[in-house]
Image: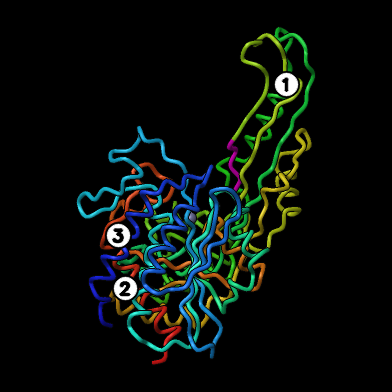
């Protein structure tokens, strides 16, 4: 596998740095400036683009490199918006894309302007290579992913569906490298958890604070919240994660594989993870993929200027993460059963999306598996689930399977403390090069004639 010429590596880094310097913190977004910048750069290289404005200062860019149409297109997806950054928490300013010690610093370097930059560089490299393509390669650089995608992917699916038409998509959510049993396992995301946020209300008698009781709204709410314990409220093992864990265990020994299968059957999740060879850090990271979880993220009751008054109402808001196949009704019933009848639980209408799970095997998986093994000797690609929600769900709804695969090498601390949404977010130049190298060959093999 030949390395991609250096000028495209430089192009990817340059595009990444320029995109980071365009502040697209969402809210308010302002992705149009980034979309226009990208349009200009791609047009200069002869690649056709369509800019779709969705609101003032908001917009999406669709770029297309044409194939001969023998097969349906491949879609590359990257969102242009980023989560806000509190400048005082950063060592180097979040929107200046400075390079220090081989790392590009800035908001969006890992979530996910790196994918946008890499995808754009792949389009340019393939356009200039003269390689014949059997399918179009489409880049969708979108707005608003961090706030529900109303002006981004959800809008495109509704109003510009024909531009997205594809056999499948490559998106964020996978490509992370985990070292287990002295071997690098690289995740290929085929499933993701859903989101179901709920509002909890407890009521009790109001009156003078000198006459408390066990049935105060605040105490009722606190008792209900305490039933959530550590937030891991129900275990579940889906095909994707069973397959992944069995594969990881099989590199330890055939016996370990059998033992893990048995433990998963018995729903002894932590024991299964340990038997597969995961250390404590990896168990912490992987455990949410085997559970429905619930976390209390906001609380409200009473008035801090009237501490002598019993509040009649106390409320909490709970962020729930559900497994594929689990519905909103199932989840609310599970919470209600767990915490009793002293609180009423209402789902928040706009804050629900179900999980999804695709078959682990696919032609794209096979190509990615082969390319990854060559790019990183000894690496094993495993099907995986993403604990967070991405734009994949919108594509899934319109019949396009979206796989999460932005390949990264594990570099200590890079993904944990300085990755998506963290202060001091940064990415090593080596990792941008890896993503470009691996994805270039995956895209080329999937779309080009041999
Ligand atoms: Zn993201």
The image position of residue 370, as x and y in percent, is 37, 82
How far separated are the C-alphas under marks 1 and 2? 62 Å
Label 3, ligand 1: CB separation under 8 Å: no
Which element carries disc 2, helix, strand or loop? helix
Report the front residue among 435 and 149: 149
Q: Main secondary structure of the magenta part?
A: strand
According to the picture, the residue beneath numbered tag 3 turns out to be: 14
Given contact means CB atoms under 8 Å apart, are the residues at marks 3 and 1 in contact?
no
Given contact means CB atoms under 8 Å apart, are the residues at marks 1 and 2 in contact?
no
Label 2, ligand 1: CB separation under 8 Å: no
One can see residue 52 in this view: yes
Nearer the camera: disc 2 or disc 3: 3
**Magenta residue span:** 293-297
Q: Which mark, by number, is residue 437?
A: 2
Apparent side of residue 392 relative to residue 65 in the rendered image (left or right): right
According to the picture, the residue beneath numbered tag 1 turns out to be: 214
Quadrant where the image shows the C terminus: bottom left
Q: Earlier in the sequence, mark 2 or mark 3?
A: 3
Apparent side of residue 346 relative to residue 117 in the rendered image (left or right): right
Given contact means CB atoms under 8 Å apart, are the residues at marks 2 and 3 in contact?
no
């Amino acid at each position: 596998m030949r390395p991609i010429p250096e000028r495209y590596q430089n192009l990817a880094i340059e595009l990444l740095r320029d995109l980071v310097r365009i502040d697209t913190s969402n809210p308010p977004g302002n992705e149009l400036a980034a979309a226009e910048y990208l349009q200009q750069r791609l047009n200069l290289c002869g690649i056709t683009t369509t800019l779709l404005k969705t609101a003032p200062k908001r917009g999406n860019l669709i770029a297309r490199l044409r194939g001969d149409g023998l097969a349906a297109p491949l879609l590359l997806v990257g969102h242009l918006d980023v989560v806000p950054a509190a400048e005082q928490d950063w060592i180097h300013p979040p929107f200046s894309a400075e390079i220090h010690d081989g790392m590009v610093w800035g908001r969006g370097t890992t979530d996910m302007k790196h994918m946008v930059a890499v995808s754009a560089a792949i389009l340019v490299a393939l356009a200039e290579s003269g390689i014949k393509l059997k399918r179009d390669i489409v880049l969708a650089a979108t707005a608003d992913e961090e706030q529900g995608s109303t002006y981004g992917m959800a809008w495109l699916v509704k109003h510009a569906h024909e531009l997205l038409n594809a056999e499948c998509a490559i998106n964020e959510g996978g490509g992370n490298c985990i070292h287990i049993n002295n071997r690098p396992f690289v995740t290929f995301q085929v499933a993701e958890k859903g989101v179901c946020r709920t509002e909890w209300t407890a009521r009790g008698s109001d009156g003078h604070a000198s006459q408390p009781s066990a049935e105060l709204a605040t105490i009722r709410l606190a008792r209900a919240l305490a039933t959530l314990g550590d937030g891991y409220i129900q275990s579940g093992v889906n095909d994707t994660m069973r397959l992944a864990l069995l594969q990881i265990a099989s590199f330890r020994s055939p016996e370990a594989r059998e033992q893990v299968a048995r433990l998963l059957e018995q729903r002894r999740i932590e024991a299964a993870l340990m038997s597969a060879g995961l250390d404590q850090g990896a168990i912490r990271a992987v455990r949410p993929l085997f559970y429905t979880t619930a976390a209390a993220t906001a609380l409200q009751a009473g008035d801090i200027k009237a501490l002598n008054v019993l509040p009649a109402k106390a409320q909490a808001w709970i962020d729930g993460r559900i497994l594929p196949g689990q519905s909103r009704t199932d989840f609310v019933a599970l919470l209600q059963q767990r915490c009793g009848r002293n609180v009423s639980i209402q789902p928040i209408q706009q804050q629900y999306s179900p999980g999804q799970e695709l078959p682990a095997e696919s032609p794209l998986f096979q190509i990615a598996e082969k390319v990854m093994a060559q790019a990183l000797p000894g690496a094993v690609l495993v099907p995986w689930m993403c604990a967070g929600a991405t734009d994949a769900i919108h594509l899934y709804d319109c019949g396009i399977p979206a796989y999460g695969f932005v390949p990264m090498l594990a570099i200590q601390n890079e993904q944990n403390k300085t990755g998506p949404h963290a202060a001091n977010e940064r990415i090593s130049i080596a990792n941008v090069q890896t993503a470009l190298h691996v994805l270039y060959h995956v895209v080329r093999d999937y779309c080009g004639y041999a």
